């Protein structure tokens, strides 16, 4: 039952705190990797009976069930508000944007059945009951331009435009936060989006050999203007012409603390994967700290969503490690658990 905002803020903060305490984040995440089989992992995560299906299918079912549980819990929290904050709804919309990518690909390849989607109803803006009419599925939404079945050659561009639409919705909803935590939430997402652009630029430069202009056309912007003065792209623009094998160039960089180690006399190249892994751990640590700093505002639930998404990623890592027989020590390292537990 929806409450008035002050009562809902207090109840949701208390409820989310309890749920987070019982989640597999921080030091508790290691328990996911103590499971010796997928069946044990399922029993650790869910009350439901373990499905009697092959391991490959069980891994997929486990990951789908974990995602379904995460979405259901988040919806149960925001349903306490008569009018949930735009930022809460936008976070759920991240799955809507991913859903339309899957739907577009399915239609592109002539599939008769709608692909599996993440159900965020009643907060969805895609009209799934209109399948397979893509123009009716996206009508009256931020994706209304996606109104015909794409060609294979258009998929990449469409995916970029879909990602851009989500980022713009996310940033717009951050600006609408009315409570005192607005600068904190905006800063949290701003720094992540800026660094995401840096990482994307590095990947395009190193792995795909794109030039400056090509990379600029693939960056994420805060508005549809795609101005080179956009705050989201400034950090990425600064490094586009830097030599990726010169430590001297990078050692005084704004994000130097995220760089892969340099050893004198040893060939060095900037490693986007290393930067991503370190930055993800720092992002999770910062989010964990922020959860309790601004109670009774939007901040705790935004942080809860981020931390539970990270938990979901860790569950997937644990599941895939069991399916592929990856040693638990290596799986824990891949998930970045040890570094995280030392700081939360």
Image (cartoon, helix red, strand yellow):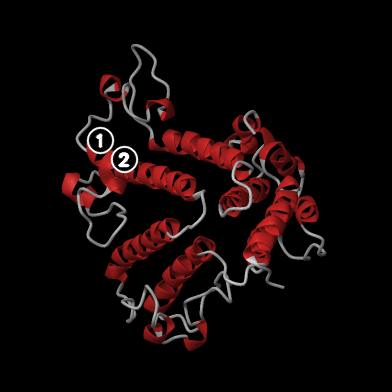
The total of numbered circles placed on residues is 2
Residue 279 makes an appearance in the image: yes
Element under disc 2: helix
Depth check: 82 or 201 in front?
82
**Residue pointed to by mark 1:** 239
User: Taking 234 as reference, is 82 left or right?
Assistant: right
Marks 1 and 2: which is nearer the front?
Answer: 1
User: Taking 28 as reference, is 258 left or right?
Assistant: left
Point 39% across, 19% down: residue = 262
Q: CA distance from mark 1 to mark 2?
A: 8 Å
User: Taking 196 as reference, is 208 left or right?
Assistant: left
**Residue pointed to by mark 2:** 202
At which x and y percent is residue 71?
Answer: 63, 64
Element under disc 1: helix
Crowding at dot 2, Cα within 10 Å, few <14 / some 14-19 / many 20+, comes out as many
At which x and y percent is residue 96?
Answer: 48, 69
Point 37% across, 30% down: residue = 255
Crowding at dot 1, Cα within 10 Å, few <14 / some 14-19 / many 20+, comes out as some
Point 45% across, 75% down: residue = 103
Question: Picture quarter containing residue 238?
Answer: top left
The quadrant in which the C terminus is found is: top right
Point 62% across, 46% down: residue = 314
Question: Picture quarter containing residue 257?
Answer: top left
At which x and y percent is residue 248?
Answer: 27, 19
At which x and y percent is residue 20?
Answer: 70, 48
Residue 61 makes an appearance in the image: no
Query: Could you tell which of marks 1 and 2 lies nearer the N-terminus?
Result: 2
User: Taking 285 as reference, is 165 left or right?
Assistant: left
Q: Are marks 1 and 2 in contact (CB under 8 Å)?
A: yes
The quadrant in which the N terminus is found is: bottom right
């Amino acid at each position: 039952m929806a409450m008035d905002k002050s009562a809902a803020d207090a109840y949701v903060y208390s409820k989310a705190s309890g749920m987070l305490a019982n989640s597999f984040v921080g030091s508790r995440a290691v328990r996911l990797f103590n499971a010796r089989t997928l069946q044990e992992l399922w029993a650790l995560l869910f009350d439901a009976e373990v499905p009697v299906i092959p391991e490959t299918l069980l891994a997929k079912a486990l990951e789908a069930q974990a995602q379904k549980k995460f979405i259901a819990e988040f919806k149960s929290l925001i349903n306490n508000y008569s009018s949930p904050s735009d930022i809460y709804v936008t976070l759920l919309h991240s799955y809507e944007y991913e859903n339309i990518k899957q739907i577009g690909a399915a239609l592109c390849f002539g599939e008769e059945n709608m692909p599996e989607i993440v159900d965020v109803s009643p907060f969805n803006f895609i009209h799934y009951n209109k399948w397979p009419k893509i123009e009716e599925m996206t009508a009256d939404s931020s994706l209304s331009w996606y109104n015909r079945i794409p060609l294979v050659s258009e998929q990449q561009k469409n995916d970029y435009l879909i990602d851009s639409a989500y980022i713009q919705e996310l940033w717009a909803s951050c600006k609408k936060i009315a409570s005192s935590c607005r600068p904190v939430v905006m800063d949290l997402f701003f720094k992540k989006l800026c660094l995401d652009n840096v990482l994307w630029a590095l990947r395009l430069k190193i792995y795909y050999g794109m030039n400056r202009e090509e990379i600029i056309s693939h960056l994420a912007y805060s508005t549809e203007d795609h101005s080179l003065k956009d705050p989201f792209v400034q950090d990425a623009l600064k490094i586009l012409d830097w030599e990726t094998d010169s430590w001297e160039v990078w050692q005084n960089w704004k994000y130097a603390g995220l760089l892969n180690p340099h050893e004198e006399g040893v060939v060095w190249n900037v490693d986007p994967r290393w930067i991503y892994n370190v930055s993800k751990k720092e992002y999770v640590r910062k989010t964990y700290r922020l959860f309790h700093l601004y109670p009774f505002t939007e901040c705790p639930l935004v942080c809860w969503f981020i931390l539970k998404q990270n938990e979901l990623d860790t569950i997937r890592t644990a599941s895939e490690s069991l399916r592929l027989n990856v040693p638990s020590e290596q799986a824990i390292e891949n998930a970045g658990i040890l570094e995280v537990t030392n700081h939360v």
